[in-house]
Image: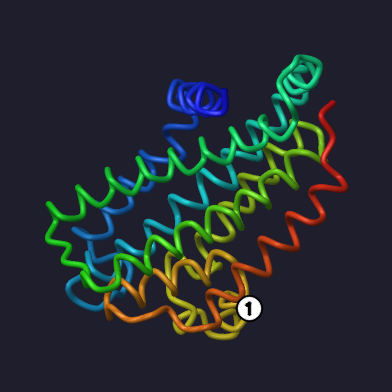
């Protein structure tokens, strides 16, 4: 039953044109465009510097923005209320969404990693295991934030806020540019889940070593804090 619920959630996400644009096409366009066009100052080879940050953007797009918008509109149209009234237990509804988010992230990483490889990406093989850990932590942290936002506000407000946060974190949250290039905002970016995930993935995939304690701790704190608040504030209607 859990796998069926997760498979349904994945199919709904992949059939939604706006979700595909946000979670896959925009990260793909940024990966190709910023690799080939030297608009943003990056060390060479550019694709090695850029790919970990595009992975972080993809995780944020699907686990946070996509999840928040889908959750908000499912509440608005009564989907969650009807599901909760069936024999399906609530924990299974939540677990199905988590599995679906992980499946979408896996698809994103495979597609983006394949295109990056065609562009010349050569990650540190010894860091791939750590990269999987960071992606899982990032998915849980952003997923908790997405449920927190989508479960507390009206759908129209969720749509606007989720997209604004996405742009702010992309431009000033440590994804498009590393915190070291953000001047005074760099310290703040390192404490955001976007900056922690981008820096952690960059470290493990370019150097091959562990990500350091700070990015891991930042993601765990965001996941625990957002998850704890969401369990008290999330509404199904």
Which residue: 34% across, 74% down? 204
Which residue: 33% across, 52% down? 30
Q: Position of residue 16 (x, y in %)?
A: 48, 23
Foreground pick, 81 / 166: 81
Which residue: 66% across, 31% down? 92
Foreground pick, 66 / 139: 139
State whether residue 45 is above or below residue 36: below
State whether residue 28 is above or below residue 39: above
Q: Position of residue 62 (x, y in %)?
A: 51, 43
Name the quarter where the N terminus is drawn.
top right
The quarter of the displayed image where residue 181 is located: bottom left
Which residue: 25% across, 52% down? 113
Q: Position of residue 214 (x, y in %)?
A: 55, 82
Foreground pick, 67 / 188: 67
Left or right, residue 13 beside residue 93: left
Q: Position of residue 130 (x, y in %)?
A: 38, 69
Mark 1 crowd level (few <14, some 14–19, many ≥20, 10 Å Cα): some
Q: Which colour scheme appears in the figure?
A: rainbow
State whether residue 122 is above or below residue 237: below
Mark 1 element type: helix
Which residue matches tag 1?
188
Left or right, residue 21 beside residue 161: left
């Amino acid at each position: 039953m859990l796998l069926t619920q997760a498979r349904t959630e994945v199919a709904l996400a992949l059939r939604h044109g706006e979700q595909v644009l946000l979670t896959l096409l925009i990260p793909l366009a940024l990966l190709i465009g910023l690799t080939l066009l030297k608009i943003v100052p990056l060390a060479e080879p550019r694709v090695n510097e850029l790919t970990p940050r595009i992975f972080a953007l993809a995780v944020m797009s699907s686990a946070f923005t996509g999840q928040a918008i889908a959750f908000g509109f499912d509440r608005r149209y009564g989907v969650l209320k009807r599901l909760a009234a069936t024999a399906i237990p609530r924990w299974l509804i939540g677990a199905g969404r988590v599995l679906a988010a992980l499946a979408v992230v896996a698809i994103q990483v495979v597609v983006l990693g394949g295109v990056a490889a065609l562009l010349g990406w050569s990650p540190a093989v010894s860091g791939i295991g750590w990269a999987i850990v960071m992606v899982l932590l990032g998915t849980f942290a952003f997923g908790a934030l997405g449920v927190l936002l989508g479960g507390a506000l009206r759908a129209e407000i969720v749509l606007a806020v989720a997209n604004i946060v996405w742009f702010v974190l992309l431009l000033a949250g440590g994804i498009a540019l590393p915190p070291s290039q953000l001047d005074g905002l760099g310290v703040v970016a390192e404490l955001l889940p976007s900056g922690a995930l981008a820096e952690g993935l960059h470290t493990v995939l370019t150097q091959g070593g562990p990500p350091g304690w700070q990015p891991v701790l930042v993601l765990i704190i965001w996941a625990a804090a957002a998850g704890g608040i969401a369990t008290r504030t999330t509404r199904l209607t």
